[in-house]
Amino acid sequence: MNTNEKLVIKGGKKLKGEVNIHGSKNAAVALVAAALLVEGKVVIENLPEITDVQILLNVIGELGGKVEHLRHDTVSIDCTIVNSGKAENYDLSKIRASYYLVGALLGRKRHAEVIFPGGCNFGVRPVDQHKKGFEALGAQFDTTGGYISAKTRKLTGAQVYFDKISVGATINVMLAAVLAEGMTNIENAAREPHIVDVANFLNMMGADIKGAGTSVIRIRGVEKLTGGKTYSVVPDMIEAGTFMIAAAVTKGTITVKNIIPEHMESLTVKLKETGAVSIIEGDDHITVKGIKRPKAVLVQTMEYPGFPTDLQPQMVSLLSIAEGQGTVVEGVWDNRFQYIEQLHQMGADIRVEGRTALISGVSKLIGAPIRAMDLRAAASLIIAGLAAEGTTTVYNLEYLDRGYEGFVKKLAELGADIKRVQV
Ligand code: EPZ
């Protein structure tokens, strides 16, 4: 991805039209890693074309897997042979999802050594729950020397109780347990749709997982997983939510298509609470019509099915032009408000106290040069630019390319005055 580009946005346009939502980034990265567990070829459809996925596909090839791009959103991955448990491609240090390679390689090869993951900087991002799960299964786990490594002679099913609800640790233990001997029970598991997606994929390939999507997941280890099937990635609820909020902010009308409306429930309810939108739900789409200036509301982010932390920055952009005092409490991450100093450049009146943002809505934002600091913050600042008066320039676009496929093109097709140009 070309990092010496910037976005130039002329605000004030009402976005109108339909947008096809791509497969979930946070499911796709786990599914690509899960393919390492299958002794055979799998085909994955509705795969988003984003750099996080591409990095993992490259590494699968380096580990001995055969990756073939069949169509723009469809790949075949054949891991009949996996000849190494060591993943040392430096790109892995830029993404969080690298750690799924640990669970998959531990499950497949009984040993894994993966460069320590990177990803968005929200303060401390420990892996102690991953460690707890892998050690319960009998592995020795180590995070020194710039790698996450786990190894064991035998993986034995175990009782795993998570002290913190963790998407990554839930998926990682599931990956390691599907080929272990005996039963594994994961308690206090995360319940996100992408966890259900990974369990569905593994079960399609012959695993025996029950309860995904609830806080107790039971996994009976099996001998091996076999390929020969095709799996389609669940729609990206965060991309869908980003466009729903964009409709509200610009007082436009956007239909987000190819989604699962129930995944959007917490956002749909919250947007209705602001009084800013009318919403019509179909079987696989939602139409959001921005009708007036939002009223300020309280947003508390938490694990699914609560309001998703990955829509927190986008919601703050909406509330920055609301009527009244809005409050956003970040219930998942220590420090996920860093982007707010960029909104201040646009005239937003927001005070951050620890994990709480106190937002005094202003009647309008003014365009300014701003810098993306992480993936969802990039989307949030673009949304602010779409609503702002005047021109907004957004830098550090590499964050955007990590998780949104064709975001700028989709916005332009909805009528936004937005261009990606050389810095
Ligand atoms: C996943 O991160 C997502 N990333 C994040 O999305 C998302 O914000 C997060 O889940 C919560 O939904 C991917 O799926 C690649 P966690 P993950 O483990 O797995 C603490 C995006 O924009 N924790 O659920 O790293 C942790 O510090 C990205 O798409 C421990 O204490 O998140 C946090 O406070 C940003 N110990 C909380 O749990 C652990 O061992 C939730 O983290 C693991 C996590």
Image: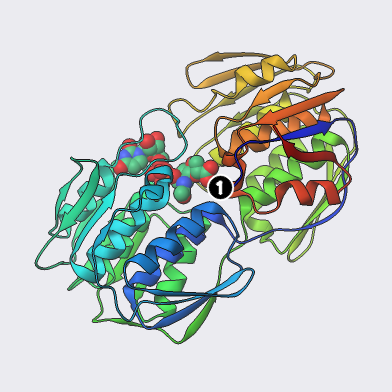
**To which quarter of the image does residue 224 belong?**
bottom left
Height in image: 299 above or below 405? Answer: above
Whole-percent x and y of residue 170?
35, 54
Whole-percent x and y of residue 85?
23, 63
Whole-percent x and y of residue 109?
21, 69
Height in image: 389 above or below 189? Answer: above
Q: Which residue is mark 1?
A: 402
Height in image: 73 above or below 333? Answer: below
**To which quarter of the image does residue 334 belong?**
top left
Q: Is residue 356 visible?
A: yes
Q: Quadrant of the C terminus?
A: top right
For this view, does 11 lie left or right of residue 385? right
Q: Secondary structure at mark 1?
A: helix
For this view, does 115 lie left or right of residue 214? left
Q: Residue at x 86, y 30 (%)?
A: 11
For this view, does 343 lie left or right of residue 188? right
For this view, does 82 lie left or right of residue 254? left
Picture quadrant of ligand 1 = top left
Q: Nearer the viewer, residue 166 or 386?
A: 386
Tally of numbered tags: 1
Whole-percent x and y of residue 20?
75, 60
Q: Is residue 303 visible?
A: no
Kindly give the residue lying farthest to the left in the view shown: 153
Kindly give the residue lying farthest to the bottom in the view shown: 228
Q: Nearer the viewer, residue 370 or 385?
A: 370
Q: Nearer the viewer, residue 373 or 193?
A: 373
- Dot 1 amino acid type: Arg
Label 1, residues with CA under 10 Å away: few <14, some 14-19, many ≥20: many
Q: Is mark 1 within 8 Å of ligand 1?
A: no
Query: How has the structure been colored for display?
Result: rainbow
